[in-house]
Image (cartoon, grey):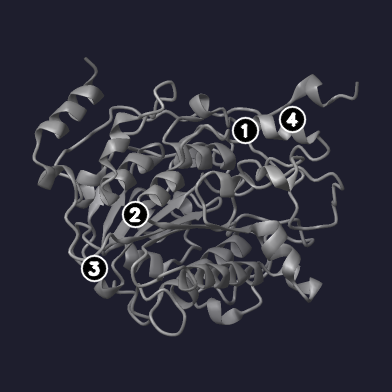
Amino acid sequence: MSLHRMRQLAAILMSCSLASPVFAQEPPNLIFILTDDMGLEAIQWAGDEGQRSELIYTKNLNAMSQQGVSFRRCRVNPNCSPTRACLMTGRSALDNGVVGVLGRYNPLDDAGNPCESTALSGAPAWVTNRLALQTQERTIAEVLKQMGYYTILIDKWHLGYDEGYPVSEGRELLPYTQGFDVFVDWMDDICDGYDDPEHYFYADHHMLRAMQAARDAVNNRPNPTTTPYALFFHTITPHKRHSDGTSGWWEIDDTSLLDETSEYGDTKEERFAQNVEALDTALLRELLRTGGDRLQVLDPETAEYQSQSNTIVFFLGDNGIDEILNSKAKNTLYEGGIRVPLFVMGEGITGTPYQDTLDDRQISHVDIYDTICDIVGATTERDNPNGAFPRRGESFAYNIGYSQIEETRDITVCSLGNADTGDQCRPN
């Protein structure tokens, strides 16, 4: 009998009060913040092991992490799409088939659009679809929706789009067919929505529009007083954009988002640091703080958690920083490519305010799925009803105070693949 199955049987034998969380209020809202190309160098609290860039300032993320549990041994895949597929499915990239980066199929191949991804551009739609996350996968969004959550994905899906099918089949955008009630796409709904084209070339305009979309989706959900929400805020920041002739990272137009880095120049390292600090500031000021139409999670001055929000916040990077900044980071299987910041804070999370709770348990990105299931009480998901589609996760709910069962892992598995379609893309 496998160790995982033995743990399942142990959980069944325990009383229901131990197997399922007991919420002080209603089931907690969930906010999952996934940043793009933000490895350990890009957050201050990772500096204890010499990983942090001395140019980086993340005071709000620091304050948030200090109120929860920060995991120093979290590993993901070294590039974007595979990590996201693993988070959605609880299955490795080698299991779910998303082994390389997927661009959105664009028959016009508009190279002049700085928001457009050119990966696989020009490939037939059916080729891109075959490389996408397949619809038989049961995503964590589908689980949460079945549990009564209103599910929202903002900015970056990057797992295929099922282009080329008629709208009548309902397959034109995969997020809607894989558990999401709302999807605000980073290209169609954010990049292409500017009245002033000049705003394309300021990183903060995109980020702030994405945060506004997130607030609107949460605040306008049906029956907001009784319906919990799960917001997957998958921001493209601080990923570099098409080069503006200097560094590859766009400028920050609203300098009020910059405190420590406002006097930086135009080197690639300085621009990257400005993008990181702008995100850090905006997460508190524009998304999570109390007041106005914000999400009422954090005090606007101290970033202290507000318990009346009944919200749990996950923060995770999708891979290491860009290879332009570190040749042993993104797109490599070195630690710089796969080891990323992860912290969890908010309702019921173990931790003393402003006293670091650092956890050295090994975490894999495939563990997020089962952890969320434990938090919301979706215990039947442990049985993995898909059978032939095994998940690989080991929940870390115990480590954050949401389970009586401690799970551990000896290894993490990360892979680096290629989504090259080869001869399939050649004309007949």
Q: Which residue is mark 1?
A: 100
Q: Which residue is mark 2?
A: 343
Residue 371 x %, y %: 31, 44
Q: Which residue is mark 4?
A: 127
Q: Secondary structure at mark 1?
A: loop
Q: Secondary structure at mark 3?
A: loop
Q: Which of label 3 and label 1 is nearer to you?
A: 1
Residue 153 at least partly seen: yes
Q: Are marks 3 and 1 in contact (CB under 8 Å)?
A: no
Residue 28 x %, y %: 30, 61
> In the image, what residue occupies the spot 72% across and 59% down?
188
**For marks 4 and 2 on the same chain, the one whose residue lies earlier in the sequence:** 4
Q: Amino acid at mark 4?
A: Val
Q: Are marks 3 and 2 in contact (CB under 8 Å)?
A: no
Neighbours of disc 1 within 10 Å: few (<14), some (14-19), many (20+)? many
**For marks 3 and 2 on the same chain, the one whose residue lies earlier in the sequence:** 2
Quarter of the picture containing the N terminus is top left
Q: Amino acid at mark 3?
A: Tyr
> In the image, what residue occupies the spot 75% across and 64% down?
192
Q: CA distance from mark 4 to mark 1?
A: 14 Å
Figure quadrant of residue 23: bottom left
